[in-house]
Image: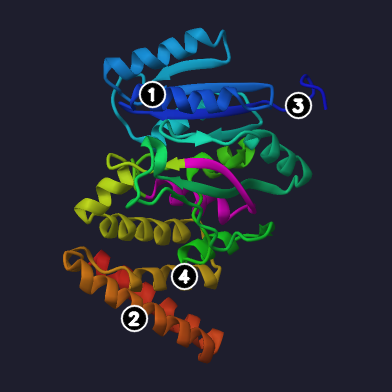
Amino acid sequence: MSADQQSTVSVIVPFFNTREDFLREAVASILSQDYQPLQVLLVDDGSADAAGSAAREIAHASQGTVRYISQPDGQNRGASAARNLGVSQSTGEYVAFLDADDVWYPGKLAEQVALLESMPDVAMVFGLSEYWYDWRGSAPDKPTAFVPKLGATRKRVLSPPEFVVKFLRGRIIVPNPSNVMVRRGPYVTCGGFERQFTGMYDDQVFYAKLGLRYKTCVVPKRWDRYRQHPNSLTALARISDDEIRHRRRFLAWLAEYCRVNDIEAPEVWEAIAKALWLCPKADQGSIVRLVKVATWAKKRLLHVEERVVPRKLRRRWWLRREWEEQGEQER
């Protein structure tokens, strides 16, 4: 297929006070891809002057391939709003995201476009991410890199709502946003990212909205390097023990989304109820070691339950628990 026949890929790179060297590495990994035509949008989410200046310089040097855009009011509105802004000003049939501190492996775009072209009923493809610790040089007592492969050891298409159920139950990797490629049509139809999720769980909210409506495809192929550093949102949340609170907020949002949109799939409701049961309430999260032991024990109980309790009875029980949980929140 010649370049003028190929579909355009729009790459959205949200950034907020990202280190200049990280941003330049990210953009370089995009521009070194062997796929054209390509459109890159650097979305400034209220950064200080230094990061914004670096992005504008990168855009100017690209001679039109890279565009710099910013929030209209110059405020920091979070990754969800920044990604939506970028997509709204893009033109590609396919959309890919790259966080400004991550990088892509060569061939990522061409391989993902080929997959979507071969599967017109699939809305999103994703694969494996390398958790990247050695970007500053490896140390003998530190991990260098690892690639989670849970549920992604072979290529397979997941029909709705299988992907959502699997990631809620911890049975498949939750892809890094820097790893996925999505068709523009389904992205727009499902409403993109949710603005109220400004950092933690913004990706899982989007995947839930998409995966409840459309097919997704997982491929055992490594496509990105997911930089691990102490200033990332995930690292900061774990340090402050906020991850539990963010997860419960996500699960409450998902339950309400399913109600409003008349999602009647019992396997989804069962997965939500079990995820809430495994997730302690905020005021219980301070005793970290005890919480981890309790969660491990609960997971073992669920494993036994799913082997011995009939599905219909099991789902009836968990659906009742989910509605009771909702009743407590409303009171």
208 is higher (above) or lower (below) than 12: below
Q: Which residue is mark 3?
A: 6
Whole-Å distance between the Cαs marked 2 and 3?
A: 51 Å
In x, y percent, where is residue 321? 37, 78
Q: What residue is rendered at 39% in x and 44% in y?
A: 133
Whole-Å distance between the Cαs marked 2 and 4?
A: 17 Å
Image quadrant containing the N terminus = top right
Q: What residue is rendered at 51% in x and 53% in y?
A: 147
Amino acid type of disc 2?
Answer: Ala
Q: What mark, if any, has residue 297 been given in the picture?
A: 2
Image quadrant containing the C terminus = bottom left
Amino acid type of disc 3?
Answer: Gln
Farthest residue toward the bottom? 308
Q: What mark, if any, has residue 271 been given in the picture?
A: 4
301 is higher (above) or lower (below) than 144: below
Asked if the residue at tag 3 contacts the one at tag 2, i.e. Cβ–Cβ closer than 8 Å, the answer is no
Asked if the residue at tag 2 contacts the one at tag 1, i.e. Cβ–Cβ closer than 8 Å, the answer is no
Counting the numbered discs, the total is 4
Labels 2 and 4: the sequence-earlier one: 4
